[in-house]
Image (cartoon, rainbow, N blue to C red):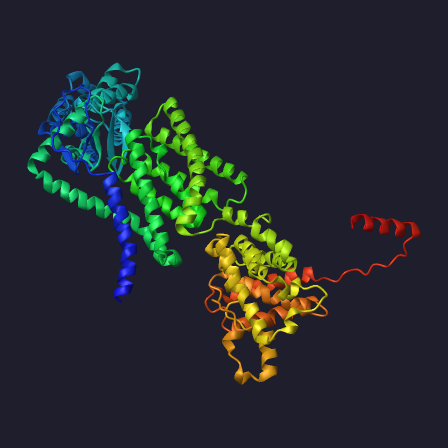
Amino acid sequence: MIGWLRFHGLQWALLLLVALVVQLAFPPPTLVYVPGWGLGAPADRTVVAPFAFVVRKTDEEITREGIERAQQVRPVYRFDAATRDSSVSALREFLAVVEAATLSPSAPAVIVLAGESRSVRLSRDEAEWLARSPRRQAMADSLQRFVNALLSAGVADAGQVRAERAEEVNLIRDDRERQVPRNALITFSDYVERSDRAAVPEEDALGQRVFRRIAASFFQPTVIFDEPLTASRRGQLRLGVDSLRFRVRAGERIVAEGEPVTAETRDKLTALRSELRDREPREVLGRTFAGGLLVNGLMLLPFWLLLRLYRRETWRSLREMIFLAGLLAVTTLLASGMMAAFPERVELLPVPLAALIIAMLYSGRMAVVAALVLAIVLGEQWALSPTPALFMSAVTGVVAALGVRAIRRRSRLYVTISLLVLAFALTTAASGLLRGWTLDETIGSFLIGYLSAVASVSVAMLLLPLAEIATRRTTDLTLLELADPSRPLLRRLAVEAPGTWAHSLTMANLCESACTAIGANGLLARVGCYYHDVGKLSRPQFFVENQGRGGNPHDELSPDDSAAIIRAHVNDGLALAEAARLPESVAAFIPEHHGTGEIRYFLHRASEARGSAEIDPSAFRYPGPSPRSRETAVVMLADSVEAVVRTLQKPTPEAVRNAINEMIGQRVASGQLDDAPLTLRDLDRVREEFARVLSGQFHNRVQYPVATPSPSRVFRSSTEIAARG
């Protein structure tokens, strides 16, 4: 338990170490004294908020803003149907009284008195017209229709409308509220003007005057200003005024060196000065440092969890964990140095560089997570939070991680550079549009991003060999170099053991195809096949593929000596691999492709000679270990399958498939694949790929007829042979 804690504690300690490096690279501001610059004066230093604080408004500002906001509320008017009904009913009653008065001998006087009681001031002539005119009834009907129609349409008080400043008002009618222009409201003057046009009879001036007088007397506003509702709404906005003018985040830059001090900057500095007076500086800085360290650790945590849960082989390798932690720490220090030398030039942040190295060493997925974590860690630092560092680093880092993938050709580098340049172009354009950059600023940012893209790829290629040495991992570029047939070890194999070399080439094609089918590293399998039998260089004549038609040296040896020679080629191969400085991933193919399997031929000979009871089984077994990777496991299967298929008398597709199934079944049953991360689905795909490739290699050939050569041709052939020696 103690050992387990110690081992995993080291991995988590690396996380805290990187978080500490980040905190030291971007320390919290130690600002205690706040300069008192005048308005418009250039700042002689950069001021960064050491903690979050607020800038409050004065009471006068809150009151003024409340009034301004209240004035934005449109006044509310409400249609009053009861007032309309009351006016129309009063008019109807008055006209009924007039109609009844016409039966009295003193009708004009009665009408005058009736009008005065209802606020209708009629002259003697107008009362006589009402009492004697035969058109009285027609006018009464028209008058009722006019008053009902106009009051139903809605008529507002002229004085209230003239006093209203709002260009638009809200009108509530039938429980529905709508917005209408203030000038669209009908007032008393509009009411009187329309009564002039509606008055009947047109040719009777006295009758028209009576019509207008009665219509005006029964006018009441039916669109009423709802003062309580309007005041309530304005009061809510007035009370909703935010008392805070600014919220300053921790790490936010208040003013940069050389910038003029604006009113906003002055208010923020004043508020900061007041906050510092109320706090203890040492306590503030200590808590800020501890909080920053915790934040950095939590932002780095996803990358460590990825390694712990999904890259356990990397997690178990302290060497690789130290390298990855060091890479993140160095990237942070480089970012800090770049920002110190070139402030706000976030295009120079080395996130793409780190993503490229991790992608080429490990995988694009792992590099994507690393790039995003680095972008977040750097982008959230106080010195970089006001800049587009997070956005630009995240996009370019992810593009670098996905764009590099497996570099096996030099042209791939140009593709990676092009993708990075495109990413910088898009992020620069987006940042420029969002932040209001000028065209010159946008173009300048893109040019710096272009240089950063080229430099990132170039430096990554220069550092890659050092990274391989530090992690003992092998990239595709190194594998391509090892696959060069002109390398001394392979050249020796081709010259001194041509049969073994031919076997290795056949194995390489077979294993690369099978590994690619199951998602393993086909290039690693190919290179591993080239070197898996280099140990046979010590005694090539003792292996059947290098023996001609002469005698077999094993015929003169005992089974024990023969088995010892066969076993020795594993250790001999490892010695040659060490001398040639082959990577561990390639050298692993030498012992693991045999595993701990039996040397069956000589074990059988020994059993026949002296009985199985007197035999030491370990003397007839390869030293191992068993395959521990998918690639070495595939090579083990291919080595056995290829040897068996070659012994088939009639290698038909069915016979080849049966031989493959039988041999793979034997390897699985013997436990040689127990340590290899192969699934049953992988084995099925390997079977299919072996059958496809081997069936093509051992296909039936056309039997060509033998032609009798002419004497001249025989002579020329003999001469050519003699000339070639």
Residue 571 location, x and y as percent? 50, 63
Frontmost residue, 270 versus 158: 270
722 lies left or right of 657:
right
Quadrant of the rendered image containing residue 666: bottom right
Residue 286 location, x and y as percent? 14, 43
39 lies left or right of 604:
left
Residue 667 location, x and y as percent? 54, 71
Residue drawn at x 60%, y 70% as measured from the top left:
661
Quadrant for the N terminus in the image: bottom left
Q: Is residue 271 above or below residue 207?
A: below
Frontmost residue, 663 versus 534: 534
29 lies left or right of 276:
right
Residue drawn at x 51%, y 52% as measured from the top left:
580
Q: Is residue 651 above or below residue 121?
A: below
- Is any atom of residue 267 visible in this view? yes
Frontmost residue, 134 versus 686: 686
